[in-house]
Amino acid sequence: MAGVYISYPFCAQKCTYCNFASGVFPKQLEPLYQRRLLEEIEKTNWSWTPETIYFGGGTPSLWDTGEVEAVLAAIPGAPWREVTMEAAPGSLTEERVAAWARLGINRVSLGVQSLIETELRRTGRKHTAAIVESDGALLRRHGITEINLDLIAGLAGQTRESWQQSVEGVIALAVPHVSVYILEVDEESRLGQEVLFNGQRYGARDVPSDDLQAEFYEYAVERLAAVGIARYEISNFARPGHESLHNLKYWKLEPYLGFGADAHSFDGQWRWQNAEDVEAYTNGAAAPEREAADTAGERYWVGLRLAEGVPEGDAAKAKIERLIEDGLLERLQDRIRLTPRGVLLSNEVFQEFLSDGSH
Ligand code: SF4
């Protein structure tokens, strides 16, 4: 069964490490965006009933709950199995969370990133460890127990000790799902630009080395596994039965429809992406070009993200043998999956399956 992604690109501030098409926009753009989004959803000819909905962004937890209700009312399939709201710690209020619970939102993903105040301030985030803790308690009081906490390995100033403190702090909050991302350094974020061009703003000189970031990641994998939160995808960890149903669809090549600026869609055969620019989208930028999906190759470079790997099949045999010899893939009966070293070098492995048509 398929999923729906809703993009709300508005944020209270632009975080230094953020490379998404989100940020701070004029307040008057919001009602226009809302109207365009509803139009896009309402003109959809649903050939399947959605099973999961994911509000991402941006900071959709800042969205007026009446507007969220209007969006949900336009999507068929209620009550859905899983409805996730991405949230910035500190943006939750009693009324907001009560409304979410009433609307069927049953999973919240909190962008914690770190529990160390000095690291958070350098990113532009304003929350504290105490706020994360009270947000968790507030969600649980309203019956929302499917909580994910995001962490980023590689923030400026992060040390072995501070990383351990963040990981241990997240474990102490006893949530069923944790995501651990390694800092992405590219020209799309302010911090990324500083790092790439040897600048010093946003603490760029204090970004931990790649080796240290890999060590942080492995520490998290080990510690989370030790408390029963196993890695099921490169960046995602859950107690059994608490995996994100919506995100699993991406890795299992199941269809999903995305609405809003920069939202991606896949119908099992074709992929397309809405205008990335929020104003262009709001002004009704022309319908996006569709591209035929390369499902034979994607089966590997999307599916290999999963800890369970993918069925081996008959394609790309020579390539798979070579990656096994190099210690990046391993065979488990009729499936192949990344080895621990392959996880750290996963981009190189995925590149192999993208690089030519021999899959
Ligand atoms: S990291 Fe999240 S909150 Fe920060 S600017 Fe990006 S989308 Fe907004």
Image (cartoon, rainbow, N blue to C red):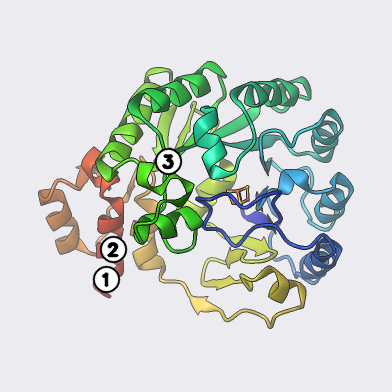
Residue 150 seen anywhere in this rendered image of the structure: no
Residue 106 seen anywhere in this rendered image of the structure: yes
The first of marks 1 and 3 along the sequence is 3
Task: Indicate left or right for 270 with 107 as reference.
Answer: left
Q: Is residue 271 above or below residue 129?
A: below
Counting from the top left corner in percent of width and height, residue 192 is at: 43, 56
What secondary structure is marked by label 1?
loop
Q: Tell which residue pokes out farthest to the front in this image.
A: 200
The first of marks 2 and 3 along the sequence is 3
- What is the three-letter code of the residue carrying label 3? Ala
Counting from the top left corner in percent of width and height, residue 117 is at: 55, 29
Residues at discs 2 and 3 in contact (Cβ within 8 Å)? no
**Which residue does the numbered mark 2 point to in the structure image?**
351
- Residue 355's tag is 1
Residues at discs 1 and 2 in contact (Cβ within 8 Å)? yes
What secondary structure is marked by label 3?
loop
Q: Residues within 10 Å of mark 3 (few under 14, many from 20)?
A: many
Q: Residue at x 68, y 58 (%)?
A: 9
**Which of the two discs, 1 and 3, sits closer to the camera?**
3
**Which residue does the numbered mark 3 point to in the structure image?**
156
Marks 2 and 3, how far apart at CA: 28 Å
Task: Indicate left or right for 37 with 87 as reference.
Answer: right
What secondary structure is marked by label 2?
helix
Q: Is residue 16 above or below residue 30?
A: above
